[in-house]
Amino acid sequence: MALSVKEGRVSSVTLLRRLNNRSRKNETYEVFGEVGRAVRASVLRQMAAEGPVPRGPRGHQPPTPRECPSVRRL
């Protein structure tokens, strides 16, 4: 798709109009959905192959609101 836009075969406006349609019958929308699922599966496989994610001293727990200075108190 990017090459088609770059070469002038498809205008970017037409492409955005087709992608914003969200119609199940829209082939472009379905293809991009499948590409997204394939990329997500590939990334998950790579992460699983790399092994466990290194953890900090607290493990995987997020900081409490008292420990996090960026949290605004209500």
Image: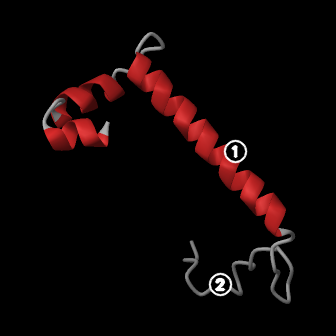
Q: Which mark is residue 68?
A: 2
| SS label for mark 1 | helix
Proximity of marks 1 and 2: CB atoms separated by less than 8 Å? no
Disc 2 crowd rating (10 Å Cα; few below 14, some 14-19, many 20+) is few
Above or below residue 32? Residue 68 is below
In the picture, residue 65 is in which quadrant? bottom right
Above or below residue 51? Residue 33 is above
The x and y percentages for residue 67 are: 71, 87
In the picture, residue 72 is in which quadrant? bottom right
At x 34%, y 20%, the residue is: 21
- From the viewer's perspective, tell me whether residue 44 is left or right of residue 59: left
Above or below residue 26? Residue 60 is below
Q: Which residue is mark 1?
A: 41
Above or below residue 69? Residue 40 is above
Task: Tell me the colour scheme of the image.
Answer: secondary structure
> Which of 8 and 72 lies nearest the eye of the viewer?
8
Disc 1 crowd rating (10 Å Cα; few below 14, some 14-19, many 20+) is few
Quadrant the N terminus occupies: top left
Residue type marked 1:
Ala
Residue type marked 2:
Cys
| SS label for mark 2 | loop
> Which of 5 and 32 lies nearest the eye of the viewer?
5
CA–CA distance between discs 1 and 2?
33 Å
The x and y percentages for residue 51 are: 86, 69
- From the viewer's perspective, tell me whether residue 4 is left or right of residue 69: left
In the picture, residue 2 is in which quadrant? top left
Q: Earlier in the sequence, mark 1 or mark 2?
A: 1
